Image: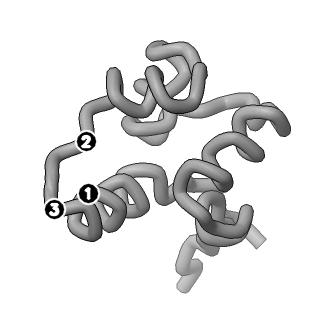
């Protein structure tokens, strides 16, 4: 079953920004969470190669979401 792990960081960030009616920069997320900017940049660009439990926990708290809202497995269509 081929597929890949992807994250919905940008989607959740956009939803949070819409709720707050303001733009949210990665620097704002860094300031509020303490997560390194380089790590947040990897999440924002879907380039995460190692999923660190403390980072996932912090992002779930920040976005008020569950792990499955943040990280998903996408199956590749094999025809």
Q: Marks 3 and 2: CB-CB under 8 Å? A: no
Q: Marks 2 and 1: CB-CB under 8 Å? A: yes
Residue 9 position in % (x across, y down): 46, 51
Nearer the observer, 78 or 49: 49
Element type at marker 3? loop
Residue indicated by mark 3:
21
If you read the primary sequence from the N terminus, does the residue marked by circle 2 or circle 1 appear first?
Answer: 1
Which label belongs to residue 75?
none
Element type at marker 2? loop
Image quadrant occupied by the C terminus: bottom right
Residue 32 position in % (x across, y down): 49, 30
Q: CA distance from mark 2 to mark 1?
A: 6 Å
Element type at marker 1? helix
Please tell me how crowded label 3 is: few (under 14), some (14-19), or many (20+) other residues with Cα within 10 Å. few
Residue 39 sits in quarter = top right
Residue indicated by mark 1:
17
Which label belongs to residue 24?
2
């Amino acid at each position: 079953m081929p597929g890949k792990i992807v994250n919905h960081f940008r989607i959740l960030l956009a939803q949070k920004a819409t709720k707050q009616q303001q733009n949210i920069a990665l620097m704002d997320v860094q300031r509020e969470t303490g997560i390194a900017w380089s790590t947040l940049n990897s999440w924002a660009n879907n380039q995460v190669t190692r999923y660190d439990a403390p980072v996932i926990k912090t992002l779930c708290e920040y976005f008020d979401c569950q792990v499955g809202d943040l990280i998903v497995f996408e199956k590749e269509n094999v025809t």
